[in-house]
Image (cartoon, rainbow, N blue to C red):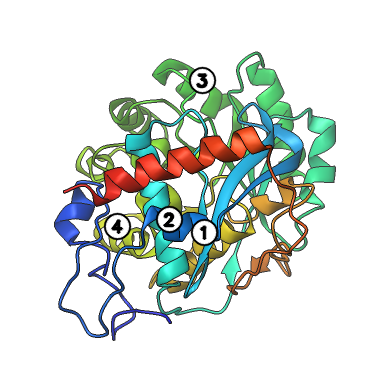
Amino acid sequence: MVFSSPTGRNKQSPFGTSDDRKKGVPTFRLQPKNPPPPSMPSADDLLESAKVVALPMHTRFRGVKVREALIFSGPAGWGEFAPFVEYEDAEAKTWLAAGIEAAYLGPPAPVRDSVRVNATVPAVPAEEVAGLIARYPGVDTVKVKVAEPGQSLADDVERVAAARDLVGTVRIDANGGWSVQQAIEAVAAIGDVEYVEQPCATVEELAQVRRAVSVPIAADESIRRAGDPMRVAALDAADIAVLKVAPLGGMRALVALAERLPMDVVVSSALDTAVGMAAGIGAAAALPDLDRACGLGTGEFFVRDVARSFRIEHGTVRPRRVEPGIDLPLASAERTRWWHERLRRCHDLLTRR
Ligand SMILES: [Mg+2]
């Protein structure tokens, strides 16, 4: 059961009005659309099939070496609810909306059958870069993490140089770690890259850096954690928008936002399991315009995923439905309870009038 608009563009999400999405609040109001949208499942519906997994990772990422996620199934497949543990419910609830969309509606109609992806290199020593890139067969674009606390600009320069020796296109991601001045100096030291993602924390700072350097600027946190993702465009703060399904409240919300943003977009995952990754790839496959490699290869970070990982071939991944295995690495009873309660609270926020 897959609901999508006849044009495949899905300007109108069956999960809410465009006004709701403007405010970043996914809702589940019934709309007189054809085919009719499903009603909002209850928290009990979701928890009936829910599994809380704890996936071991090859490399520490965002300070963790185990990624927890709650997955559940619905009539259209599986959905993921895995906001980072430090997120408040008000932010986490959009992740639940995205999971419900995946499980109850499935992806919007695709316009391409494969999506180009980048390799991701965390803040590792330069000598480990080649080994990491080797996990991404055929990629021509690498995203290198920079501005890691406790490391120096020289570390960043070396790591980027090591990546540049191996692939044609390097993009860097500072995760908001620099001041405006540091960003300008770092860009000069690192040299030419496809773009610098989130050099500084605020939209205003991004705009300042963008005016000072010739390298394109990408906005990630400034879109995903902002009350108004359109501010980046209003302040001329970026050339590229990095869009993620779960923080934006779903695949259709992502496609709708991409249509409104006057800039290139890159679809990326947020340390998603194979279930969340399927939604990211589903959204990327449905975008009318997509010219750059997407950050949808991070499944390579997991020692074990919930399902067969998306295989990267010739630098691309293909959209498909994901069926989790039966022998999953489950979280402890205590963590499982914590996730169930979190889901109930977020469900309550989503359905509150
Ligand atoms: Mg980023």
| Residue type for callout 4 | Leu
| Mark 2 Cα-neighbour bin, 10 Å: few <14, some 14–19, many ≥20 | few
| Residue type for callout 3 | Glu
Measure how far apart labels 4 and 3 are at the Cα level.
32 Å
Question: SS for tag 2?
Answer: helix
Of the numbered discs 3 and 2, the one sitting upstream in the chain is 2
Q: Are marks 3 and 1 in contact (CB under 8 Å)?
A: no
For image coordinates 24% across by 48% down, the residue present is 25
For image coordinates 71% across by 22% down, the residue present is 155
For image coordinates 50% across by 22% down, the residue present is 177
Of the numbered discs 3 and 1, the one sitting upstream in the chain is 1
| Mark 4 Cα-neighbour bin, 10 Å: few <14, some 14–19, many ≥20 | many
Using the image, tell me which numbered label, if any, was put on residue 48: 1
Looking at the image, residue 253 sits to the left or right of residue 122; the answer is left
Q: Position of residue 143 (x, y in %)?
A: 62, 44
171 above or below 107? Answer: above
**Res 18 → quadrant:** bottom left
Q: Are marks 2 and 1 in contact (CB under 8 Å)?
A: yes
Q: Where's the N terminus, which quadrant?
A: bottom left
Residue identifier under label 4: 257
Q: Classify mark 4 as within 8 Å of ligand 1 or not, answering yes or no.
A: no
Of the numbered discs 2 and 4, the one sitting upstream in the chain is 2
